[in-house]
């Protein structure tokens, strides 16, 4: 898809034109004597419902947001991708080698190579390019900077070498493959799908090869609310093991019933077998499975509440889902670092600040990072002030939903 800057950014187009011009100037410094021939953008995402359900083929609500990563790009003929993000070293990826490289694991070069490798496996054309990028999707913000970056690379290769014919679902699946196999993080498909499809969407991953995606139109401002994400400042370093344990423990419960994923397990059979499951998989795995069943069902209720305009029910469901994440899923702080509990602290402060109004929950993968809150517009100023007094200036983001995913910008 190709969209104009006016279509993409609306009232902030002047600010964005300056941002792209500054990136073009940076391109000239990184690649002397060259000028960019195309520009691309991919959004961050916010998870609205379904916390850690996607990797077990569950349901999710998510939305693309107005914070994005952008790129200035020129195709090359040498089959090498050279990409430098502002503030980082250049990644150089020779596309003659499309298998995982151990020294690249957990680095951005692995994502570039992984996206190109999977596209090639699927029969798409790949090729070299020079690119520079800059991002407003802050790392560790819970808005999935990695998925935005992956979708950006997939979008670039789609437009440079495939006439833009890599569809959003394929781009998301390719990006997840890159993150799982090349980067080494066993994530589900939620982040990539939300960043690729755009808008506010309900997703059902019962068949990840053909996920069901439904767009739901709604306007929070119409109901008198703002969607906020509060960055508690926690570090995401050394958390891969914490993230990996969640799907692994859920699948250990599924394997007890001869299944690969909890979505395929009968919930009543699960509850009947809890005594045996405690011995086979452990109490935390049982609790995390309970969260999956409850949150998977909650997503459907949330979507129906939004479609019917029952916003008060939606808010109650959001907070209920958040309590399940805290008590059953247990992803609000890292078990190996109990002194750092920014997320529980934020949740407690938000509950006090909202005083029975709105809703709040852990946001994204959890363990460190961000929380999400639905804040009455008349309380937004005081809410931001309170959050930033604790977690720092600029820690409270007010998000808007973006209607498109990865795009070329004309």
Image: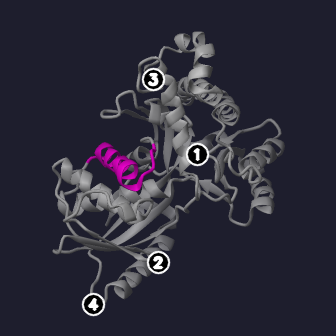
Of labels 4 and 2, earlier in sequence is 2
In the shown orientation, is residue 93 left or right of residue 402?
left
Residue located 56% across and 22% down the image: 280
Residue 191 located within the stretch drawn in magenta:
no
Q: Which residue is mark 2?
A: 18
**Which quadrant holds residue 38?**
bottom left
* Of labels 2 and 3, the one closer to you: 3
Queried whether the magenta region covers residue 172, the answer comes back as yes
Q: Which residue is mark 4?
A: 33
Q: Nearer the viewer, residue 293 or 311?
A: 293
Q: Looking at the image, which is closer to me, 183 or 360?
A: 183
Q: Give how far apart the Cα atoms at labels 1 and 3 are.
A: 20 Å
Q: Are marks 1 and 4 in contact (CB under 8 Å)?
A: no
Residue 181 visible here = yes
Spatial separation of the CA atoms under disc 1 and disc 4: 46 Å
Q: Which residue is mark 3?
A: 255
Please name whichever residue, 363 or 378, is drawn nearer the observer in this view of the structure: 363
Residue that mark 1 sits on: 242
Q: Residues within 10 Å of mark 1 (few under 14, many from 20)?
A: some
Which residues make up the magenta segment?
A: 167-187
């Amino acid at each position: 898809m190709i969209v104009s800057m006016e279509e993409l950014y609306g009232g902030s187009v002047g600010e964005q034109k300056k941002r792209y011009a500054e990136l073009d100037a940076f391109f000239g410094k990184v690649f002397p004597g060259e000028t960019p021939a195309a520009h691309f953008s991919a959004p961050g995402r916010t998870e609205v419902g379904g916390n850690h359900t996607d990797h077990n083929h569950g349901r999710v609500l998510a939305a693309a947001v107005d914070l994005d990563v952008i790129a200035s790009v020129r195709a090359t003929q040498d089959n090498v991708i050279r990409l430098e993000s502002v503030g980082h070293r250049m990644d150089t990826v020779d596309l003659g080698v499309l298998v995982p490289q151990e020294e690249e694991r957990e680095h951005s070069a692995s994502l570039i190579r992984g996206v190109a490798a999977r596209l090639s496996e699927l029969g798409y054309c790949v090729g070299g390019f020079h690119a520079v990028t800059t991002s407003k999707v802050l790392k560790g913000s819970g808005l999935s900077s990695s998925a935005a970056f992956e979708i950006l690379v997939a979008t670039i290769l789609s437009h440079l070498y495939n006439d833009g014919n890599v569809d959003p679902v394929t781009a998301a699946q390719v990006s997840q493959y890159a993150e799982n196999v090349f980067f080494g993080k066993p994530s589900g498909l939620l982040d990539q799908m939300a960043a690729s499809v755009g808008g506010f969407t309900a997703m059902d991953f019962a068949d990840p090869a053909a996920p069901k995606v439904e767009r739901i139109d709604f306007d929070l401002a119409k109901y008198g609310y703002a969607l906020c994400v509060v960055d508690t400042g926690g570090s995401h370093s050394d958390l891969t093991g914490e993230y990996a344990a969640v799907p692994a423990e859920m699948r250990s419960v599924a394997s007890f019933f001869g299944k690969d994923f909890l979505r395929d397990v009968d919930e009543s059979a699960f509850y009947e077998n809890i005594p045996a499951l405690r011995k086979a998989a452990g109490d935390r795995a049982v609790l995390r499975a309970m969260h999956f069943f409850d949150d998977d069902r909650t997503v459907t209720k949330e979507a129906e509440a939004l479609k019917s305009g029952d916003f008060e029910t939606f808010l109650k469901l959001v907070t209920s889902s958040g309590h399940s994440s805290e008590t059953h899923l247990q992803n609000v702080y890292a078990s190996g670092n109990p002194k750092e509990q920014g997320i529980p602290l934020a949740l407690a402060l938000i509950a006090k600040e909202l005083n029975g109004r709105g809703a709040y929950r852990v946001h994204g993968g959890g363990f460190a990072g961000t929380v999400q809150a639905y804040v009455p517009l008349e309380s937004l100023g005081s809410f931001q002030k309170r959050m930033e007094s604790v977690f720092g200036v600029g820690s409270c983001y007010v998000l808007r939903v973006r209607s498109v995913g990865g795009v070329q910008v004309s």
